[in-house]
Amino acid sequence: MPQQRFRRMRVISALAALLLSPALIAFAASLIPGTPVSIASVNGVINSIAILDSSHVVVAYQDTTNSNRPKVAICSISGTTPTCDTPVTVAAVTTSALGVTALDSTHIAVAYRDNTNGNVSKVVICSVSGTTPTCDSPVTFAAVVSVNYFASALDSTHVGISYSDANNSGHPTVVICSVSGTTPTCGTPVSVASVNSDHQSAVALDSTHFAVVYRDQSNGQRATVAICSISGITPTCGTTVASSVAGLTPSLARLDDTHFALAYRNFTASPSAPTVQLCSVSGTTPSCGAAAAIAPNSSVYTSIIAIDSTHLAVAYQDLTNSNRPTVVTCFISGSTFSCDPATVLSAVASTYTAATVVDSTHIAVMYQDTTNGSHPTLVVSAYAPISAPTVTTQSASSISRTTARANGNITSDGGATITVRGFTYGTSADLTSGTATTTDSGSYGAGAFTGSLAGLTCNTMYYTRSYATNS
């Protein structure tokens, strides 16, 4: 009696088919928050954070307990445990806005508003030895009243600063400063657009391109993006692109030299959910894709970071859930993305959320803990993205007149437990019709597995395909 023949086919997990539309279907990832640590026993607002190296971050805040001084502290990180050194006063002045960035592992730049001396805009460079910052003399880069500073290093000797120029009708403005040692030299500030703006954020795409986002109060409060090219310390900004909705507290994350992600609170919608758009850049022209909510609750103080070029994290204050500090992680596939359910970092009320990546498996989020003395607080979370399992199909064995044994191998579980595995089989080569399925449900890992095929017709060609689904 002729034997049935089986051909080998390969399959990737059913989870791979879930990545269909922006942020509408969850993918699997693991975000495990560590224990939150109070940076200082003071009331700290207007938080800002930046990565120094894979084991150190710098945090900055306005110390309202101590005359609204601008403060910075260096925190070392071991796993998910941060240890913060004593905060240092950047300058003996009052402030109401500031932003920090790292030039390299031993130098930081802090931009702030000096309320003591005419509300002018200043930048100071601090050197870091171990966990001790030492700040040099501040330099005024704009003799104007400004708000919402955001700093981003272009390279180790240049920093870009964005802010709203209150002396010039609130125009979103960019200034570039070169740094020699701990001495900054700043160019002439350039208006990005002739509109009233606030809620600034910025990110360097490379050493000569700077992306800026702001809330355009002259255009329906839309989150609006511009790309500025940099020559020396002179920026030239291109055409702006606005979101289709009101976008509050927007922020940016660099994916690569020509791609970035935009997050904001969608104030047009109800609830005003945290929302993400993926954007590309050609020269100084940005183009952004469709916007999608990444969580069902209302949010504010969104802070987006790129873990790598295909993974994002968005931290925010969850207004619907008692103002909890919350993070959503997302996976990018081409021009689309999918997001995991939200993770609450701590069961406290929070505000002034800011985030940075530590390394490919850790992120750090800073917030004001309004449940516990309004202290500036830091929590580090371990991140493990979970992908679709990888499965191969081998030739069938133990073939009889009406039965056979199918053989497959799970070569990778994708970082999560396999909950279902089995085989699809039938007489069509593409297995699109007239198929049957074997299913094993349980808890499995990587490795070989088999399935019993029954009810086969003698002298007929059959095809098999293995599959697996993880948790």
Image: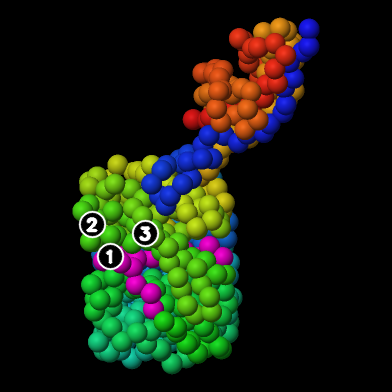
**Which sits earlier in the primary sequence, circle 3 or circle 1?**
1
Give the mark count: 3
**Which sits earlier in the primary sequence, circle 1 or circle 2?**
1
Q: Is residue 43 above or below residue 201?
A: above
* Distance CA(mark 3)–CA(mark 2): 12 Å
Circles 3 and 1, Cβ within 8 Å, touching? The answer is: yes
Q: Pinpoint residue 47: horizontal percent, then vertical percent.
A: 35, 64
Q: Which mark is residue 452?
A: none
Task: Name the image quarter holding residue 79.
Answer: top right
Q: Pinpoint residue 94: horizontal percent, then vertical percent.
A: 28, 77
Q: Is residue 177 above or below residue 324?
A: below
* Helix, strand or loop under label 3: loop
The residue range painted magenta reads 240-256
Q: Which residue is mark 1?
A: 245
Q: Which mark is residue 269?
A: 2
Q: Which residue is mark 3?
A: 291
